[in-house]
Image (tube, rainbow, N blue to C red):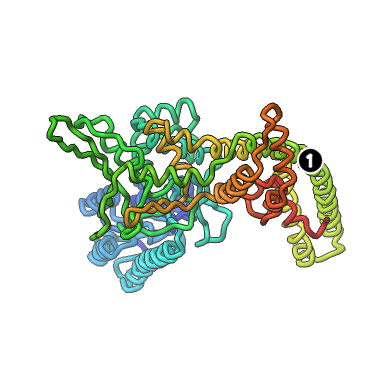
Amino acid sequence: MQEITEKIKYFVYARKSSESEEKQIASIDSQLDELKLLAKKENLEIIHIFKEEKSAKAPGREIFNEMLRRIEAEEAKGIICWKIDRLARNPVDGGTIGWLLQRGVIKHIKTYGRDYYPGDNVLMMSLEFGVANQFILDLKDNTKRGLRKKVAKGMLPGRAPLGYYNDKYQEKGEKDIKPDPKNFEIIKKCWEEIIENKIGIDKLHSLAVNEWGLRTHWDTKPGKSTFHKTFRNSFYYGYFKYNSELHKGIHQPMITQGQFEEAQEVINRHGKPHPKRHIFAFTGLIRCGECGAMITAESKQKKLKNGSTNHYTYYRCTKRLGPCSQKCIEEKVLTKQIDEVLKTIEIPESFYHWALEILREENKNDGKIRIDRIELIQKEYKDTIKTISRLIDMRAGEEISAKEFSERKEPLTKESARLEELMRDNEQDNSQWLIKAEKLFNFAETAHLAFKDGDLATKRNILGNLGQNLILKDRSLVVDLKPPLQLVRTVAKRVSEIRTRLEPNNNQELHKVWSEIYSKDTKLGGYRELNPNKEFHKLLCCRYTIATINTDLRLAKYL
């Protein structure tokens, strides 16, 4: 340590950055406590303390620059700081400090463990500044590389939007985004309100926050600005933006792209003066089979010779994704095609009542089976917990090593978690599947007539519930029926064959007669055995509930 011949005054500079690479650096208060003790021990006179909470990776720190101005004004000629990188982590500020020290404007820099003087070789200090700067550059490159890798996997590198949460328990680089149990259904309901009821964002914000209990990740009420941005985010239909590019995500979408685009139309026009426009039943639901763009609609008028006017509605491709050769189709023709699809799933009232009777009876039987299964799982769970407890006692008594304890405990912990999940699955109200089945059969029985006589909203709702992928190509609508409806179509066809062949004459007891006929039909009985592991068959065939099937697969080794 060089001897200081003149009594100089010192500034203390303490900095804490909020950036992640400096999270482990001591807080400002703890820095100051240590630096004051250091100054007292070395008998250094402190005339002012500068505290700053800002990163040093780029020039422009106001408090740091103020300190340098006061040093050049000769108010002080020494600096006390925790480490030299507290002063600078960029070449501009590092060069300034080095130049002031080399000129003797700064006589002494005291850090916790090292001294810097004008007579020293400034190369060493420059090297330390360079190392700090290089650390920032390397960290930046590594971070970007990690983010690019995550994007390539289809994962959003950032905070999950409302309705989702970041799974922090995954390994670094594998932390994906999952539906938030608290907010997912609330945000989904918001989308439905926009699309179906054309509600404005401001009104929807009030409903979601004050009535439905929507909260942010920090359990606070989301502001209007945040809420508005939520419904502009492509993340909800399965894509996310990174560096202005759209990427397909692996997360669970909340809505379809068609629904997103339809919602944007509602949001864009809501609250703004706009001319009167036609409302069409099927826009936002159907895609072009050639280019993949959405199908839109427009109304046209044709004046007749007698002075009257005919109105026509045509559906056509928007052609927003590029050139497309598809021609338009009149609404009457499109409606007739939808009607033909609905006829294929139509079931008579007699079959509806018979099927529900069978479903309710099966639900009672499932309840008894579920109770037995829960008891079996609970016994396995208690045995596993006892084994873990004995293992802990053995480790406490040093009967086994730490390595052996860890190796034996890990599979038992996983097993207990698996059994806990099974208990939760089985304790859920399995009658929900019966409610879904009733809705399914009710839809199959009434959809055809409701579509024929319903208003635009009814027709739109029916088409939306009919298929997963609605494609219009060469003026023909292709409907990929939802899985439950695919089996309904098969059953409906068989029921139609039975009724054509065996129409009973006894009008007084039609319900009883049809029940007997359906029960004895071998093909209908066979449908109950089709692929019981598929969820939509479980709804119709009433053999197992969803939770029961999952449990059967997991407990195969115990049963």
Residue type at numbered disc 1: Asn
Classify the position of the N terminus by image quarter.
bottom left
Image check: 256 left or right of 552?
left
Residue at image x 34%, y 51%? 10
Image check: 195 left or right of 252?
left
Residue at image x 33%, y 31%? 200
Residue indicated by mark 1: 365
Question: Eyeballing the image, is 118 above or below 268?
Answer: below
Image check: 184 left or right of 104?
right
| 293 and 388: which is toward the camera | 293
* Crowd rating for badge 1 (residues with CA inside 10 Å; few <14, some 14–19, many 20+): few
Residue 63 visible in the current orientation: yes
| 482 and 383: which is toward the camera | 482
Q: Quadrant of residue 97?
A: bottom left
The single residue placed furthest to the front in the displayed view is 505
Residue 49 visible in the current orientation: no
Residue at image x 31%, y 42%? 331
| 265 and 146: which is toward the camera | 265
| 339 and 129: which is toward the camera | 339
- Number of numbered discs: 1
Q: Secondary structure at mark 1?
A: helix
The image position of residue 253, as x and y in percent, is: 46, 50
The image position of residue 496, as x and y in percent, is: 59, 45
Image check: 454 left or right of 433?
left
Classify the position of the C terminus by image quarter.
bottom right
Question: Eyeballing the image, is 223 above or below 108?
Answer: above
The image position of residue 465, as x and y in percent, is: 48, 42
Residue at image x 43%, y 56%? 156
